[in-house]
Image (cartoon, grey):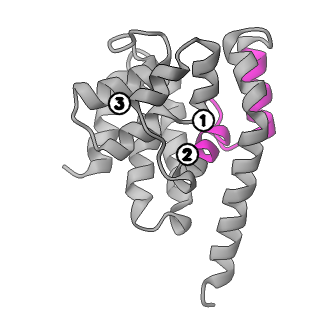
Amino acid sequence: MGLTDWAYSLSESLLSDQLPRRWKHSLGVAKRARSLSPILGRDAALLEAAAVLHDIGYSPSIATTGFHPLDGARFLRDQEGADERVVRLVAHHSCALLEAEERGLREGLETEFALERPELVDALIVSDMTTTPDGELTTPAARLDEIVQRYGPDTIVGRFIQRAAPEIFAANERVERRMAATAGAQPM
C-alpha cells in the first residue's frame, strides 16, 4: 500500500465513525494539499498524507494529552512507524508550537519533533486554514474567524489562533506567490 492510500485508510478508521465532521475536514484539507502539487514536486504525496492525517489526534481512541498535534504525531511514530516527515508535519501543523505554548507543552513538542522544511509547513498551514470544518474551500480570514467563533476568543484555541494569524496570513502569501510563479512558468 502506498503512502497516501495508507494515510487515507488510517485517518478514515480513526475519524469517520466517531468524528465524521473532522473526517470531512481532513478530506478537504487533503484535497487542498493535492491542489498545491505544482509547488511540491516529489513531496506532493508526503504533504497529502500529512494533510489527511493532521487531525487524527482528536480521535478518542488515541487522544492522551488533549493536544491533537502531539497525540497524533506520537501515535503515528509509536504505533504506526510512520514516515518521519509525515510525523513532523502532523506534530507541527498550523502553528502548533503556539498552541503548545498556551498549553504548557511547547518544550516537549520542540524537543520531541523537529520542524519540517518551511515550504511544506507553509503548504500544510494553507491547506488546513483554507478548509472549513465541513471540507469546503474558504479564505484564511474566514477560517480564523470561524475558529475564534467556535471556540471563543478567550479559550486556549481562541488565544492561540489569534496569535498565529500573522504567520497564517504570511504562509498563505508565500504559497500564493509560489503557485503564481509556477503557473507563470508553465508552457502554453
CB contact under 8 Å: marks 2 and 3? no
Q: Which class describes the residues within 10 Å of circle 1: few (<14), some (14-19), or many (20+)? A: many
Left or right of 2 in this view: 183? right
Percent from the top left, x then y, of residue 102? 65, 15
Of the numbered discs 3 and 1, the one sitting upstream in the chain is: 3
Q: Which class describes the residues within 10 Å of circle 3: few (<14), some (14-19), or many (20+)? A: many
Assign the C terminus to one quadrant of the image: bottom right
Residue placed under numbered mark 1 in the picture: 94
Instruction: Name the quadrant containing residue 38.
Output: bottom right
Magenta residues, dominant SS class: helix
Q: Check residue 142 for magenta coloring.
A: yes
Percent from the top left, x then y, of residue 178? 66, 66
Of the numbered discs 1 and 2, the one sitting upstream in the chain is: 1
Determine the CA span between mark 2 and mark 3. Answer: 19 Å
Taking depth in this image into account, of 135 and 69 the one nearest to the observer is 69
Kindly identify the residue that appears in the image at 67 percent across and 44 percent down.
137
Residue placed under numbered mark 2 in the picture: 124
The range drawn in magenta is 125-150
CB contact under 8 Å: marks 1 and 2? yes
Residue placed under numbered mark 3 in the picture: 12
Q: Secondary structure at mark 2?
A: helix
